[in-house]
């Protein structure tokens, strides 16, 4: 099992990773995605739901499907989908303390937007601990798990895969980090958003898993500092 003593860069997915899936922000975003599709493509609710899921499964994000199959301009979609209520995301002192004590820099790598990430991080109280956010705009609207965005992210932020830990709630999004030499951590939950695969994709590319990110990070801090 890979340890963390050599890690100097900590990379976190945002949704259902930095905050728990029980906040159900995706439930709100899914409703807004469907409403957007219904209005822009002039389809009924059933067809909007079908297209949202089909494009997610086929293209990695619903947005990518709309861009490729309908030549949709992305900004309006992203602004509309992320216009949600964030009050379910609570200030997290344990997460704040763990991030403050982790040695090295911290980055967010998300298929969402920088604005969405900023609002979530502000609610959690962790924005000061992160050096940068790499979002769907930075990845040229190509979502994880495609390899290209990971390579662009690593180049832009001078990330050494052999000294990086990557935290993510979707197993398929950890294949590329593993291939790049990163230590991978899967964030598990009993709550799964409706488009997420049910496959237990926990193979050699997943080195650690946890259902409690703040507690897991605290245990890493204690291990690094020799606290028993």
Image (cartoon, rainbow, N blue to C red):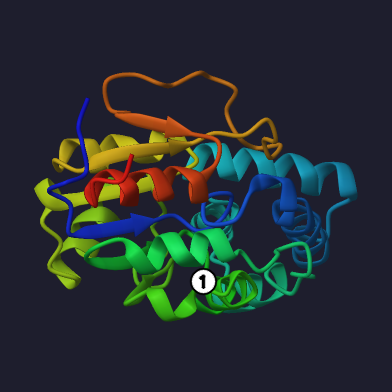
Of 36 and 219, nearer the camera is: 219
| Quadrant in which residue 25 is drawn | bottom right
Picture layout, residue 58 above or below residue 218: above
The residue at 30%/46% (across/down) is 227
| Quadrant in which residue 180 is drawn | top left
- Answer with left or right where residue 90 lies relative to residue 125: right
Q: Position of residue 139 (x, y in %)?
A: 34, 65
The residue at 57%/75% (across/down) is 125
- Answer with left or right where residue 75 lies relative to residue 228: right
Q: Position of residue 76 (x, y in %)?
A: 64, 78
The residue at 18%/61% (across/down) is 154
The residue at 53%/71% (across/down) is 117
In which quadrant of the rendered image does the N terminus lie?
top left
- Total of numbered circles in the picture? 1
Of 8 and 135, nearer the camera is: 8
Q: Which residue is mark 1?
A: 113
Of 196 and 9, nearer the camera is: 9
- Answer with left or right where residue 30 lies relative to residue 62: right
Picture layout, residue 167 above or below residue 19: above
Q: Is residue 140 visible?
A: no
């Amino acid at each position: 099992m890979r340890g963390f003593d050599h890690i100097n860069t900590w990379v976190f997915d945002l949704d259902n990773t930095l905050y728990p899936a029980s906040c159900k922000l995706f439930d709100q975003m899914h409703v807004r995605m469907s409403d957007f599709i219904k209005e822009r493509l002039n389809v009924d609710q059933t067809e909007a739901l079908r297209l949202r899921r089909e494009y997610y499964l086929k293209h990695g994000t619903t947005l990518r499907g709309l861009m490729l199959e309908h030549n949709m301009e992305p900004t309006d979609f992203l602004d509309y989908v992320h216009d949600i209520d964030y009050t379910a995301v609570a200030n997290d002192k344990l997460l704040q303390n763990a991030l403050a004590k982790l040695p090295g820099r911290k980055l967010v790598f998300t298929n969402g937007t920088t604005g969405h990430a900023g609002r979530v991080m502000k609610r959690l109280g962790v924005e000061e601990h992160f050096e940068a956010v790499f979002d769907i705009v930075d990845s040229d609207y190509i979502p994880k798990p495609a390899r290209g965005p990971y390579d662009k992210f690593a180049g832009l932020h001078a990330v050494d895969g052999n000294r990086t830990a990557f935290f993510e709630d979707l197993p398929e999004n950890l294949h590329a980090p593993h291939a790049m030499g990163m230590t991978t951590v899967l964030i598990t939950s009993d709550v799964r958003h409706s488009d997420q695969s049910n496959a237990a994709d926990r193979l050699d590319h997943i080195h650690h898993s946890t259902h409690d990110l703040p507690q897991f990070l605290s245990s890493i801090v204690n291990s690094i500092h020799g606290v028993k």
